[in-house]
Image (cartoon, grey):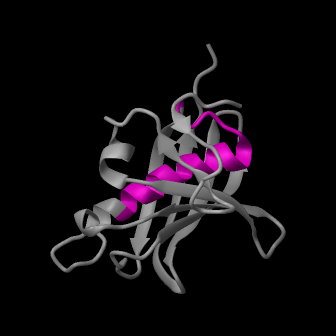
Amino acid sequence: MVDQAFQYEPAPDQPGWFTWDIKDPTRFNAQTMGKMVTRVEDRADGGKACRLRMFPERRHSNLLDSVHGGVTLALIDIALFAAMRTLLDGDAAGSVTLDLSNQFIGAGRVSEPLDAVVEVLRETGRLVFLRGLVVQGDDTIAAFSGTIRKPTQR
């Protein structure tokens, strides 16, 4: 599937990764999140996971000089769609988040890559159920689960 809303191609400066950039620079992802890259990884149980990486900067920080919780939540939401696209070849631009549950476990550090690692639990005709972790190095920053509704066929 070709998704016209996203730039998804090998990342020239990140071998083994693909770009996950929205083509319209005036949209939320580009304005708020900055550069993001993704890749598909093998899980220990034989399944696949999608890893979406962002590069936190000072503009992503809170007054404690940690990654702002809202940025972490945005990373999680965007990661649901990256997983849907990379693991299922789904229509990320035409889908919507139905629910998102998050548990903050630690604080993200600025100036170190922050990753959301997502697995698909189940796909039905209209829904995709996903879960994952936000990690930074060996530290777990958050755990989450979410449901995406696929676009209506017209």
The residue positioned farthest toward the front in the image shown: 12
Q: Residue at x 63, y 44 (%)?
A: 9
Quadrant location of residue 60? bottom left
Would residue 92 be counted in the magenta stretch? yes
Percent of width and height locating residue 29: 38, 45
Q: Nearer the viewer, residue 105 or 31?
A: 31
Q: Is residue 44 visible?
A: yes
The residue positioned farthest toward the bottom in the image shown: 138
Would residue 123 be counted in the magenta stretch? no
Percent of width and height locating residue 114: 46, 70
Q: Nearer the viewer, residue 100 or 70?
A: 70
Q: Is residue 143 visible?
A: no
Percent of width and height locating residue 53: 51, 63
Q: Residue at x 64, y 59 (%)?
A: 17
Above/below status of 87 relative to 141:
above
Quadrant location of residue 35? bottom left
Magenta extent: 72-94
Above/below status of 25 relative to 18:
above
In the drawing, does residue 15 fall left or right of residue 140? right
The residue positioned farthest toward the top in the image shown: 154
Q: Residue at x 31, y 35 (%)?
A: 26
Quadrant of image for the C terminus = top right
Q: Residue at x 60, y 54 (%)?
A: 12
In the drawing, does residue 43 fall left or right of residue 58? right
The residue positioned farthest toward the left in the image shown: 63
Q: Exactly how many numbered labels are in the figure?
A: 0
Percent of width and height locating residue 59: 23, 63
In the drawing, does residue 106 fall left or right of residue 11? left
Magenta segment, principal secondary structure? helix
Q: Nearer the viewer, residue 33 or 132?
A: 33
Quadrant of image for the N terminus = top right
In the drawing, does residue 93 fall left or right of residue 3? left
